[in-house]
Image (spheres, rainbow, N blue to C red):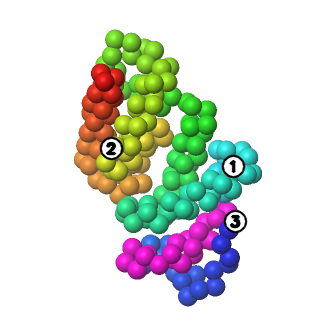
Amino acid sequence: MFFKKDSGSHSEASDEALIALYKTEKEISLIATLYNRYLHYVYGVTMKYLRNKEDGQDAVMEVFEKLPELVQKHEISNFNSWLYSVAKNHCLMRLRSEKKQPFMAVIDNNTDNFMESEDSEHLWVEEEKIMHLESCMEILRDEQKTCVRLFFLERRSYQEICEITGYDLKSVKSHIQNGKRNLKICIESKHES
């Protein structure tokens, strides 16, 4: 399941140096070095949320499979805390999909009637609308999707989102506002069709 112990020339490099080098060279062995360095840490996070050895191991692999793409996309100032957030979010999304926890309820409870609908009180219960929301989340720009998930699912503050993503406060607020608006438009258009 896991990579072998890293004996390469990068094993002593800092996380930041490995990330910077990966962004320019795109050499997967650099991600493997980070993987080996944080394997037990991420496994601990996955076990905290999933509470099952096999699920925890699967989640570790899934998190590290996404790392090359995520590291390319984000400005990361503190890899340890950023990776914790990535692993935690992955586990929460996995639990949500397994239990079919309605994401709509999270959004509805955190905004002033985010979904302005006659039956908004019961909206989160309706499976069809949940499916619409999930498909609409997929069409959001990456920045909007990340900020919306962090704000509504993980209940992170604006400042925490700034630290995790590297975006400034104005950008975070804009991504959340635009993401909410785009979700509303998308869901309404799906509901009408």
- Residue occupied by mark 2: 140
Of the residues shown, which amino acid type is indicated by label 3?
Met
Q: Looking at the rendered structure, which numbered label has been put on residue 55?
A: 1
Query: Compared to 82, does 158 lie above or below?
Result: above
For the stretch drawn in magenta, the main secondary structure is helix
Measuring 43% from the left and 42% from the top, which residue is drawn there?
Answer: 149
Q: Looking at the rendered structure, which numbered label has been put on residue 1?
A: 3
Residue that lies at the very extreme toward the right in this rendered image = 53
Q: Nearer the viewer, residue 192 or 77?
A: 192
The mark nearer the N terminus, 2 or 1, is 1
Q: Are marks 2 and 1 in contact (CB under 8 Å)?
A: no
Where residue 50 sits in the image (x, y, percent)? Answer: 67, 44
Query: Compared to 190, does 150 lie above or below?
Result: below
Q: CA distance from mark 2 to mark 1?
A: 28 Å
Residue that lies at the very extreme toward the top in this rendered image = 118
Query: Compared to 35, does 59 lie above or below?
Result: above
Where residue 94 sits in the image (x, y, percent)? Answer: 58, 43
Quick check: is 25 in the magenta stretch?
yes
